Image (cartoon, helix red, strand yellow):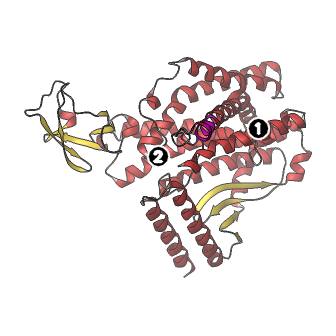
Amino acid sequence: MKRVKLFAVILLTAIAIWAIAQTELPPMLKFFSAIAILALSGEIISRIAKLHSDWGLMLLRTKKGIDIAKGLAKHEKFWNLFADFGLALAYGILSFYVIKRKATEKILIIFSALITITILLIFVYPTILPFLSYTLGMPIGGGKAATAEAGSNLLAYIVLAIVYLGGFASFITASLLIYAFTVISAIISTLIFGTTAIAETAPGLTLILPGINIPLFEGLAALIIILVVHEGAHAVLSVIGKIPILSSGIAFFGIIPIGAFVEPDEKRLSTKSKEVQKRVIVAGSTSNLIFSIIFFILLLAFLGTTEPLKQKGWYVIEGMDNGTIIYAINGIPVENLSANYTAPTSTLNLTTNYGEVQRTINETGGFGISYFPMDYAPFTQYENPVFAFIFKTLVLAFALNFIIGVVNLLPLPFFDGMRLLELSVNNKRFTDFVMYLILAAFLSNLLPWFFK
């Protein structure tokens, strides 16, 4: 009976969040409505399952994760190398002064990390925006800018130099500061000169909410993968560092997993050498970045093996309603149209996912749209719901692993990046200054939400 009740609450919560997502309410109102529903469902679930809950936040504890971590920790040399490699990803060339190894070993680790950084920047990072924007319909811009080739302008080289020198910690910190300046400039322009600059400025940050701005079930699946990967790496390095793990499990807010967790003995951790502490802390982000590449490769393999099952058509990015797909023109499937096709009349009958639409040919011979063929990966769609689910889950797993892995390196309270900075720089005034500066930039990136 308990399982039936739990299933009913979970199902009703999912339906309610899905229903909110389909409305025309402002994004902020959708967000707070979803928060209220999740808090209520969390309280109900906690009473049924007899779990402790604080405003819908629940911790599902288990010892299974600890046993798995102990088994993986047998390969101690590999995991220590893995963590030091992660420090090189986090701090780039500057990690030479952070990693505690022989100079030749440090150089090899840093060189390997720079190769990995290059792969992430050239292949993975540029595809995140178009995949999230077009595949999932997230309102984060994209289009032509999103598909620009890496390294096509001076900014790309500057970004590359920043990441090589200071790793992904410098990359995300610089990105946050630069966009904070953009937001503040827009606010000043609006308040002093009466422009609409801030209303036209996109937020630099957004919360990841399954059912609101990412698909519900695919989002839950991807978040569970990401959180287990992140916290599992922390657990393995804790075991290797001989730091007792008090508990492990998954944190839920309502039905949404918001964090897998391992609970190492913090007092024992603080007594360990800085080398051990840094390895434990950096392991989570390192694991996310590595798995971002793994899931990117899996996504490409999935796209290649399911080629015959993809929908055919043109995905319209300009000139028609968002999300419009054209399947046929004058009854001819678009994939069968010849390059020099000319319509018999000046009026075209377009078969779309929104029904039949008529367009008139203009003087240049076109009909006022820009599009991408759907065999271009970010625009891929499947009619089969199972393949659609796998595709979207892989997209989220590769994209969010990268995003969470990098953002977690920020020197902010409760982020791993703050503790790494404190362990690497023996100057509390400096680390506090950096923390407050980044905190102000972080909050500034969220301000545009309140002007929508």
Q: Residue furthest bottom?
A: 1
Magenta-colored segment: predominant secondary structure: helix
Residue 120 percent location from the top left of the image: 57, 30
Residue 438 coordinates in the image, percent (x, y): 74, 38
Image quadrant containing the N terminus: bottom right
Q: Which mark is residue 138?
A: 2
Question: Residue 64 at what x, y percent from top left?
Answer: 69, 60
Q: Label 2 amino acid? A: Met
Residue 187 lies left or right of residue 383; in this view the side is right
**Quick one: 284 or 64, which is closer to the camera?**
284
Q: Which residue is mark 1?
A: 437
Q: In terms of sequence position, does the residue under pointer 2 or pointer 1 come before the other?
A: 2
Q: Residue at x 13, y 42 (%)?
A: 331
As drawn, 142 above or below 263: above
Secondary-structure class at tag 2: loop
Q: Which residues are magenta?
A: 185-192
Q: In front: 357, or 193? A: 193
* Dot 1 amino acid type: Leu
Left or right, residue 88 beside residue 146: right
Image height of 29 relative to 346, above or below: below
Instruction: Give the structural element (helix, strand or loop) at label 1.
Output: helix
